[in-house]
Amino acid sequence: MRLVYLVLDGVADRLSDQETSLSMARKPFLDLLTRGGACGAVYTVGKGVAPESDAAVMSILGYDPHVSYTGRGPIEAVGAGVSFVEGREVAFRANFATVDPGSGRLVDRRVGRSLSTEEARELAEALDGLRLGVYGGYVKVKATVGHRAVVVIGSEVMSLSDEVDNTDPAYRKVGTISVAEKVFQPYVKKSTPLSPEQSAQVTAELVNEFTRKSIEILDKHPVNKARESKGLLKANVILVRDAGSRLPKLPSISKLFNASFGSITEMPVENGIAKILGMRTVEMPPPTEDKASDYSIRLDATLKLLKEVDVVYVHLKGPDEPGHDGDLKGKIKAIEDIDKFYVKELLDSIDLREIAILVTADHATPPAVRAHTDDPVPLLLVGGEVIPDKALRLEERTCYELGSIGVLSHGWEILPKILGIIRS
């Protein structure tokens, strides 16, 4: 039996909430699946951990990020097609952001989500190849989607290290992963070495010099002058996080689960993970305002891949962004759009006797918190000989309390359990 593994990015809210985005959304087709399937819940990286997407996705695909991971920066670089040299270069995930140049106070970590990909590319070109003036340092910058970018910092004369902290104050680096801060001061952080090694100290200095120069160059860039004249926020600093200096060495996901995998992704981090794990990757165009068209494209790709592989991993960004923006209505609408334009059409196109559907999230992004939290997320399996349980709607507490799959302690438990069920 084949499987569609559907991940709704950040779809969950707090388990303790009386009402959530999922409970308020009109989602007849996801609820139809719930009534016909078995539910549960999962702590994607573990209890007490509010994970970033990279660690969460690695985990729900079967890999313990604490053991096998080398950081988000390299993953984003692979996903964006940016090369880096181990030992001489360090890759980072980056955001264009808005800062008050005088005080260093962050006005908005994502430029109000108003920066177009085209604008970001122009700004990235102004920084790409920048010489830092110390330690033979230089920078590669590539814009990806909207405010997002990849930054690679290198040195022609010194060894560098990924043991440096983030300049993005919203995330704290813990080992090879970053954890969302519950509260943070809205200022650009100085990068600090996380190891006494000279290579870490040099890298932190290069990062801080890049921050200084990025503000100097971007603040007066024509793109930002034009934005300012329109009353828009300037994209005048780049925040970096999740340093990594090498790619993880992992068994392919096909070998791990004795099944062929394909992926449909919208963002560089998920695309990078899929490539590193050896999946057949299909990159999607960035999401637009035309959700009917967006999800039609993603559905067509899903159906095509189902003819070629055993498991199709589909990662839809929709609910996460309004969660970060504190936009409850927007998050509800994102869920309803997926239900109407993707799930409904998927159900009309497949036979659940032959193809199972697994639905979950990589993490919770409650609008009331505007950040990832450590809450468990719902898990739903339907198709084949799966026996329905008492859960009637896809909601956090319903799946947690009534689901026959139970509550899984880690995301890497999902695929062994689910594949075991549908193969039995």
Image (tube, rainbow, N blue to C red):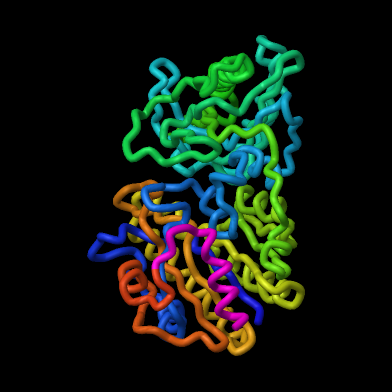
Q: Residue at x 26, y 65 (%)?
A: 19
Residue 218 in sight: yes
Query: In which quadrant will I find the N terminus?
Result: bottom right
Task: Identify which residue, 281 or 120, lies in the foreground.
Answer: 281
Is 206 on the left or on the right of 233, as rendered?
A: right
Q: Residue at x 52, y 35 (%)?
A: 175
Residue 213 in sight: no
Residue 149 is one of the magenta-drawn residues: no
Residue 418 is one of the magenta-drawn residues: yes
Q: Residue at x 62, y 31 (%)?
A: 123
Asked if 252 appears above or below 424 in the picture, the reply is above
Circle count? 0
Specify the quadrant of the image occupied by residue 179.
top left
Q: Residue at x 36, y 78 (%)?
A: 393
Is 213 on the left or on the right of 80, as rendered?
A: left
Q: Residue furthest top?
A: 134
Main SS of residues in magenta: helix
Asked if 344 appears above or below 144 in the picture, the reply is below
The x, y position of residue 256, in whole percent, is: 68, 62
Task: Identify which residue, 203 or 215, lies in the foreground.
Answer: 203
The x, y position of residue 376, in whole percent, is: 38, 60
Task: Identify which residue, 107 or 64, lies in the foreground.
Answer: 64
The x, y position of residue 91, in whole percent, is: 65, 33
Query: In which quadrant will I find the C terminus?
Result: bottom right
Task: Identify which residue, 402 or 81, lies in the foreground.
Answer: 402
Specify the quadrant of the image occupied by residue 364.
bottom left
Is 21 on the left or on the right of 55, as rendered?
A: left
The x, y position of residue 351, in whole percent, is: 61, 88
Magenta stretch bounds: 407-424
